[in-house]
Amino acid sequence: MKSRWYKDSFFYQIYPRSFCDSNGDGIGDLQGIISKLDYLKELGITAVWLSPCYKSPNDDNGYDISDYRDIMDEFGTMEDFEQLIKGLHDRGIKLIMDLVVNHTSDEHKWFKESRKSKDNPYRDYYYWRKGKGKNGKKPPNNWMSNFLGPAWKYEEQTDEWYMHLFSYKQPDLNWNNPAVRQEVADICNFWFEKGVDGFRCDVITYISKKDGLPDGKIKLPLIGFEQYCLTDNYHKFIKELADRAWNRFDTTIVGEAMGITSQNAAEYIDEKAGELDCVFSFEHTNCDRYLQIIPHNVNLRKLKKIFARWQALPKTCTPTLFFENHDQPRCIPRFVGYDCKGYFDEAAKMLAVALYMQRGVPFVYQGQEIGMTNLPVKEAGYLKNCDDRERAFMKAEDVYEDVLSVNVLKSFKKYAPFTLPIVRKALSKVARDHARTPMQWSGDANAGFCVEGAKPWMTVNPDYVYKNVNLQSRDPGSILNFYKRLIKYRLGNELVIDGEFNEFYKDSKKLYVYERRKGKDALAVVCNFTGKEADFRLPEEWKGRNAHAEICNYDEVLPLGNRKLRPFEAVVYKI
């Protein structure tokens, strides 16, 4: 039986390549993570989500797996992994790994065999189809890759095309084949038996494609999305995998869930369904995007409505709470606008309060706890920066490493070069690379990520000199120490874990105000999302109640009542 331990946990996502380099090759590794386990314990973390560390040629930084039962050479060995999991468990920290099984690498042995001939036993592990048009030289359908271009690649050897919803080096697995489904269950059980506590399942909603693979609607940003997201046999496949692996252990299974929203979430994550425990939905991270890709200022009212819908789900459905991960740019200044100059720390702390006082499973991404920001690429210079200090501005083509960013720049340079200035400005705010810069441990060379003289695999953000773990550890008022207090306050707190959610001032463009109530006790959460003072009037429900401030992001704590909230002020009162 599942204990559902995730309901009172605080997760920390580690992107191994960028976390800590132990051997001077400029690439983060497992021994580097092991060296920082006490840091995680001191932060208060109770569970880690580890991005892929399996064997991989790294076309998509580990999300293209060539061997699911071995460790990437750059990261270490299986012995290192076993030492890591023991070190985590000895500190009371659980571990979930990334499960990337919508696709493999084209260098996986299954695909190497599959491409040899049409009658190879592994042929049906993937989607192979005849092309359309004269001589079959057009893709089998009109689906687009999530990384731009057609979702098909032609192979001359067998005169057929294979499907890849991402890079052409990431061919999609055919889950209609029972052998594929059993392979995936066996992989899960292999890691469970090593002591892994669960999985975060990469693009898990894509595993079932529409029968016949019909053309998709001409709809941006992705043509074909409705034909491969949450279709046909999705529930059958997930229930089967849960029965064969996930539910045989006391696990937490988190799905990356394009297509799942607050309106349909209960169908996929209700405890009674026995499928996923919770999901990463991206409704709230699209509050600053047109067509999910073109950046604009965050709409606070829209953001609050999305949060409220997730909070209104039955208690048997658990939301996730996150602003950042390896696919999302940094949350400062993204969710607070570009008027946080002079109030950067207050804004970072306010966002933490606004998010993590809600019901759900909290996730913090490496560096978020010290306020790491996007790379200062040259094209972002037209924006008001959050910090006044000098920063070295770099050209986009010199810093972006991610396959998606590289493909975008190449494609627009080739087909629409006149749009490049706009594309570069957009990437300066939305590129996945911004979350993948090396972790800033100290003010030493390379931010303490790797030794002096080594060359980090990716550009270090130049603000590491004054924004790093060492400095903030010594400052009681730092973002890092605020996160420590907030995490400690949340863990074991029944009001936060299970209290009812009631929101006030829903139409306000400046304030986010809500309560968490259980019986006669309540927590009042008051947040100012602007860099200016904002008028606050006490809701009727809170009048005449005794109130004690539990958390505040300013040194001077002001009482609950009618007053002006300070720029980016956040307070949690027990009432």
Image (cartoon, rainbow, N blue to C red):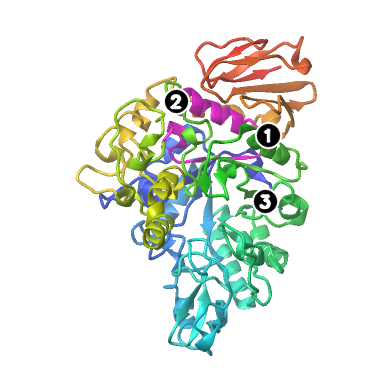
Secondary-structure class at tag 2: helix
Highlighted range, magenta:
346-372
Mark 2 or mark 3, whichever is nearer to me: 2
Left or right for 528, reference 306? left
Residue occupying the point 53% across, 22% down:
568
Residue 512 location (% of width, % of height): 64, 26
Mark 2 or mark 1, whichever is nearer to me: 2
The numbered mark at residue 497 is 1
Q: Quick one: quadrant of the C terminus?
A: top right
Residue occupying the point 34% across, 62% down:
73
Give the camera-side residue of 52 and 176: 176
| Residue, disc 2 | 344
Tell me the kind of residue under disc 2.
Phe
Res. 70 image quadrant: bottom left
Which comes before the other along the chain, label 1 or label 3?
3
Left or right for 266, reference 424? right
Task: Give the Cα distance between marks 1 and 3.
Answer: 16 Å
**Eyeballing the image, is 368 above or below 418?**
above
User: Mark 3 and mark 1 in contact (Cβ < 8 Å)?
Assistant: no
User: Mark 1 and mark 2 in contact (Cβ < 8 Å)?
Assistant: no
| Residue, disc 3 | 277
